[in-house]
Image (spheres, grey):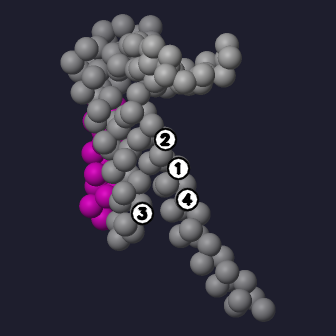
Amino acid sequence: MDLTPFLALRLGFNPGVTFGLFADSGPMGRWVLSGVTILIIGALLAWIWRTRSAMTGAAASLVVGGAAGNLIDRLRFGAVTDFIDLHWGEAHWPTFNLADAAIVCGVGLLLLAARESKAPAASANLKRAS
């Protein structure tokens, strides 16, 4: 269903990961991907628990929430349910879902947080060198 000239809703199922990688890994791949996802979620939750930065905690929480949403789909249906189709003319971005969007936004915020946390240290070093 076309919503705008560049956005449509198209139901799809991705048994793999980003851009369909490992889609042909079969039933064993489903469990391996689920296990890896659980480990990543656990590591991120530990990081969230220890961080003192609100931005880092929020960003990692977006990644955890998105990963958990995709994990639930993978465990229930054997594949992640994708439905957002961004396109320009005939050029289509791979179909994705809101969990994927949360992961991308979370990773973007983590990169910003890492950049900001290093900026004051670098300027302090420059002042000391002068």
Asked whether the beta carbons under mark 3 and mark 4 sit within 8 Å of each other, the answer is yes
- Pick the quarter of the image with the N terminus: top left
The residue closer to the viewer here, 27 or 16, is: 16
Which of the 4 quarters of the picture holds residue 5? Answer: top right
SS state under label 2: helix
> Which residue appears farthest toward the right when viewing the image?
130
Q: Is residue 6 above or below residue 61?
A: above
Provide the residue span drawn in magenta.
Answer: 35-50
Type of amino acid at the residue the image marks with label 1: Gly
Q: Position of residue 11 (x, y in %)?
A: 40, 13
Q: According to the image, label 4 marks what residue?
A: 112
Q: Residues within 10 Å of mark 3 (few under 14, many from 20)?
A: some
Q: Residues within 10 Å of mark 1 (few under 14, many from 20)?
A: some
Which of the 4 quarters of the picture holds residue 90? Answer: top right
The residue closer to the viewer here, 84 or 57, is: 84
Q: Residues within 10 Å of mark 4 (few under 14, many from 20)?
A: some
Q: Position of residue 76 (x, y in %)?
A: 21, 18
Q: According to the image, label 2 marks what residue?
A: 104
Q: CA distance from mark 4 to mark 1?
A: 6 Å
Type of amino acid at the residue the image marks with label 2: Val
Q: CA distance from mark 1 to mark 3?
A: 11 Å
Q: According to the image, label 3 marks what residue?
A: 55
Q: CA distance from mark 3 to mark 4?
A: 9 Å
Asked whether the beta carbons under mark 2 and mark 1 sit within 8 Å of each other, the answer is yes
Asked whether the beta carbons under mark 1 and mark 3 sit within 8 Å of each other, the answer is no
Horizontal side of residue 31 vs 6, given as left or right:
left
